[in-house]
């Protein structure tokens, strides 16, 4: 069953809005006066935020609902699904183009490279393996959002759940089997 704007109780009365938190400079979604959700995106990673606040639109709600539907199939609790869906919405609609960070990840032998599409789950290998969702892809590289809690890249770097990276496709492995809780 697909989530729709109509399923958000009285959507027209919902006063959710995006704003840049003044101290941390992270984008946050304000759900109510005392309920704020900090996303994984800093102001400099975004476009279309020339002003301090922006209403959570029907377009945002549509993207959010599509991500929620996708994440319902994973062994995640409601809060984890919400967190990933909100970060996915920001990544899809508001994130600036990014440079590839392929040097962090191990290449796959050409014979092991399998095709994948937007919406597929994939893995990339660094010091540890991370589970990602493909947000965009072309013949050369893909934008991926981390689904795992953290992905340890090396002794100095980790990527946290909901963060996006751009990686050359020869570092990406298809993930054709069912995702288990221990992989998240």
Image (cartoon, rainbow, N blue to C red):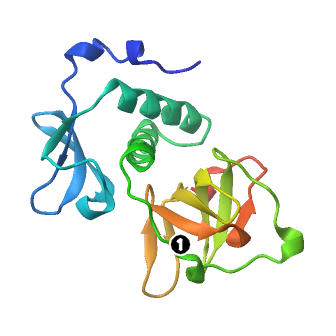
Q: In which quarter of the image is residue 142?
A: bottom right
Residue 19, by quadrant, is top left
The vertical placement of 155 against 137, above or below, is below
Q: Is residue 168 shown left or right of residue 83?
A: right
- How many numbered marks appear? 1
> Which quarter of the image is occupied by the N terminus?
top right
Q: Which residue is drawn at 40% across and 43% down?
A: 93
Determine whether 149 is above or below 85 in the image. Answer: below
Dot 1, crowdedness within 10 Å: few (<14), some or many (≥20)?
Answer: some
Asked which secondary structure carries label 1, the reply is loop
Say if residue 168 shows up in the picture. Answer: yes
Depth check: give the residue in front, 34 or 113: 113
At 29% from the left and 16% from the top, the residue drawn is 11
Q: Name the residue rendered at 11%, 37% in the picture.
A: 34
| Position in image of residue 58 (x %, y %) | 35, 24
Residue to which mark 1 is pinned: 100
Farthest residue, direction bottom? 155
For the question of whether residue 127 can be seen, the reply is: no
Q: Where is residue 170 in the image (x, y as percent from the top left)?
A: 73, 72
């Amino acid at each position: 069953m697909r989530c729709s704007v109509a399923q958000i109780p009285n959507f027209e009365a919902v006063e959710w809005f995006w704003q840049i938190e003044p101290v941390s400079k992270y984008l946050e979604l304000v759900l109510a006066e005392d309920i704020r959700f900090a996303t994984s995106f800093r102001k400099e990673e975004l476009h279309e935020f020339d002003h301090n606040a922006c209403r959570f639109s029907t377009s945002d709600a549509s993207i959010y609902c599509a991500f929620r539907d996708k994440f319902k199939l994973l062994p995640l609790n409601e809060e984890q699904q919400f967190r990933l869906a909100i970060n996915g919405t920001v990544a899809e609609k508001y994130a600036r183009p990014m440079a590839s960070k392929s040097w962090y990840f191990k290449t796959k032998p050409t014979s092991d490279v399998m095709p994948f599409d937007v919406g597929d789950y994939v893995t990339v290998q660094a010091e540890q393996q991370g589970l990602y969702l493909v947000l965009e892809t072309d013949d050369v590289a893909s934008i991926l959002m981390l689904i795992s809690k953290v992905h340890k890249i090396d002794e100095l770097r980790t990527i946290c759940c909901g963060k996006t990276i751009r990686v050359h496709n020869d570092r990406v492995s298809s993930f054709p089997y069912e995702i288990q809780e221990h992989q998240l």
